[in-house]
Amino acid sequence: MSYKFIDLFCGAGGFSYGLEMAGFKCIGGIELKEVIAKTHQLNHKHSKTISGDIRKITPEKFSKIIGTNHVDVIIGGPPCPTFSTIGDAKIRSVTGKPTSEDPRNQLFLEYLKYVDYFKPDIFVIENVPNFMTKYKGAIFNTAVEIIENIGKNETINGEGLYEVVKPVQVVNSVYYGVPQTRRRMMLVAHKKSNITFKYPKPTHYYDQDEKYKKLLKPCTTVEDAISDLPTITDNWRISEMPYSKNTNLTEFQKIMRRNSNGKTIKNNICRMSNDRAKKVFQHMEQGSKYMDLPPEVRQILPFREDIFKDRLKRLVMKEPSWTVIAHIGMDGYMYIHPTENRTLSVREAARIQSFPDEFEFIGNQQETYIQVGNAVPPLLGKAIGESIMNFLDEYTK
């Protein structure tokens, strides 16, 4: 019998999909935006995914929707715009208020209400690393304190039911086979016992101590990730196309294609870059960024150079990508194809996030790009899921 979990702030479902790859069963999800909830529902057949504001959906109501008040695991990433550097600046410019006053900072409290109601054996809060340090650690320390007091009135000794696994770790997706450097905080807490959750050990080598180089697999590169995808051009509008090759596939490509039909792939549309941008692309080498260009080239597509030093960046074929973020939904200039004068397609970005090819995104072009950029890479989710599975197998003996 599979362990069951729910995913709060589920997004498109990268984290959910990773846990399902590890052998879990997703039975419910909550996502604010309707089109994103549809993507999660489509790709998680056993889940009852609803669209709505979690602040207006009580745990009791949600338990009736999913048909049970028992789940083994809760996962989720409360929205983090005020914890990231980009989000902090944007919110200040729009509202004129300190980000400490943003109500989204309190959404993790809604997550913990669900923990208090469902009492899972283990749960994970995923967020940006700055969650631990923003406002001098005030929100992070508050979260830990609340967690350690959940169920305090239900125990004989007056102690809380849960312990936070310390130190809370920041994990890098590239260490687990994802073709991208992406650092995320994973706060794990579980019911007190003599069994302790252990974070997954890295499987791939990137920038660790040299002594690990021979012990781990080489990191997955952009070439490993996308070289078998259909050949397209700027402004491509045919979503479903045949693969460009079916032989000599990389290990990563085989994993991505494992449950696909093996013939065609969807979501391979690409935005149209303006003519000035494409002229600039022609001057960019792999790995170069906007400020590496001569002044006369930068004037073709001028930006505030004191702010947008890396406004344009061309990916490197033989290296992992840098972090894919939701801004890829705006113009994609930070993700220029390594060898072609265009930005990445939705599917190429999804591959770099380690979404298997059977995973289909619903929505218009911008919506699908944003769903990809906001997701937890499934292969990172799988690594965390396997460690959760190991914990639960010991805990439930």
Image (tube, rainbow, N blue to C red):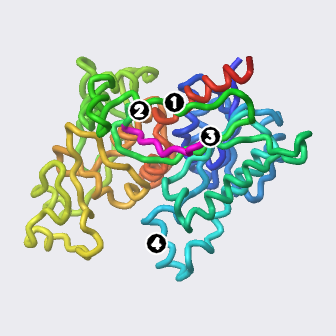
Label 2 or label 4, whichever lies nearer to me, is 2
User: Mark 2 Cα within 10 Å, few/some/many (few <14, many 20+)?
Assistant: many
Can you identify the residue that label 3 sits on?
A: 165
Label 1 or label 3, whichever lies nearer to me, is 3
Label 3 or label 4, whichever lies nearer to me, is 3
Kindly identify the amino acid type of the residue bearing the numbered disc 3. Answer: Val
- Mark 4, secondary structure of its residue: helix
Can you identify the residue that label 4 sits on?
A: 90
Q: Nearer the viewer, residue 318 or 227?
A: 318
Q: Earlier in the sequence, mark 1 or mark 2?
A: 2
Q: Position of residue 194 (x, y in %)?
A: 71, 27
Q: Earlier in the sequence, mark 1 or mark 4?
A: 4
Kindly identify the amino acid type of the residue bearing the numbered disc 1. Answer: Lys
Badge number at residue 176: 2
Separation (CA) of disc 1 from disc 3: 19 Å
Instruction: Name the quadrant containing residue 389.
Output: top right
Q: Residue at x 56, y 47 (%)?
A: 126
Q: Nearer the viewer, residue 363 or 22?
A: 22
Badge number at residue 382: 1
